[in-house]
Amino acid sequence: MRMLISVVALMLAGAALAGPDQGVGLRDADVVVLGEVHDNPHHHSTQAQIVGDLAPAALVFEMLTPAQAAQVTPDLIADPDTMAQVLDWSGSGWPDFSLYHPIFAGAPDAAVFGGAVPRDTARAAMQGDSGFDEAALYGLDQPLDPDEQATREALQMRAHCDALPEDLLPKLVAIQRLRDARLAQATVEAITATGGPVVVITGNGHARRDWGMPVYLRHARPDLTLHSLGQAEDGVLTGVFDSTRDAPAVDRPDPCAAFRSDG
């Protein structure tokens, strides 16, 4: 499902270049957020190259829980098959581990932090309990602007092929906000533990400056400088980023084909 959200949301608008730290380069930022479309190998190659060039003190992965991240060591990274098994990557729902392993290998001595929201926490959030004890610090307790809320609900509906009940849409937006806040929290943990710099690996939707993880990080740690990179497919990208890179789109089936009828 998260793949569907990322793929469809990517198709909806063009990119812009803005942000309060505009001009802070990749090498100068305390936090570098590297966006992706999850199944695009070109995006992962770019991430691995940047991570290798920056040699950050810490890596934060949207794809890992804190418990999974705690198992990552340089020795484990040196054995990708065992690493995939230890992380139970095949059961995670993420694309093949071969896409992500070069990112870990780009900075094998970096401390690894997990920014994922566990599934049971996400289910509880659907019932109105985010389980996030620092909501005020990260701005998660503040309602969205009504226009942004409506836009995000419309994106969720399109991302789910116009097949959802409307009363579910605010809950899905709330879960996305929770994931942004959790990524920001994991980034602060990484900065506190290592001093930085920190690289965050996440989807483009969470990397965008206008309503993704950087918004929540700014609430908690306005002193940190940040550079967000969004990665487009064939020139198409949604959101506000400090910089963008383009790559060919992946040939993937229409995610909404199953919802159509020949009638």
Image (cartoon, rainbow, N blue to C red):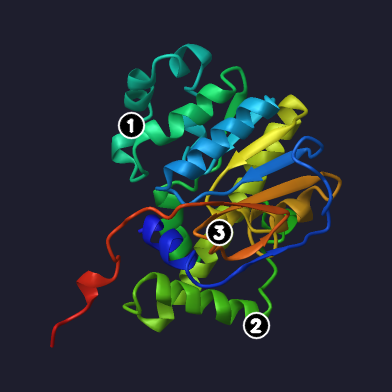
Image quarter where the C terminus lies is: bottom left
How packed mark 1 is, by other alpha carbons closer than 10 Å (few <14, some 14-19, many 20 or more), is few
Secondary structure at badge 2 equals helix
Q: Amino acid at mark 1?
A: Asp
**Going 67% across and 27% down the picture, which residue do you hit?**
53
Q: Left or right of 254: which side holds 123?
A: right
Q: Which residue is mark 2?
A: 146
Q: Position of residue 197 (x, y in %)?
A: 74, 32
- Camera-side residue of 76 and 141: 76
83 in relation to 171, above or below: above
Q: Which residue is mark 3?
A: 205
**Going 29% across and 71% down the picture, which residue do you hit?**
256
Give the quarter of the image for residue 28: top right
Q: Which mark is residue 128?
A: none
Q: Amino acid at mark 2?
A: Pro
Q: Amino acid at mark 3?
A: Gly
Disc 1 vs disc 2: Cβ atoms closer than 8 Å? Answer: no
Q: Which residue is mark 1?
A: 88
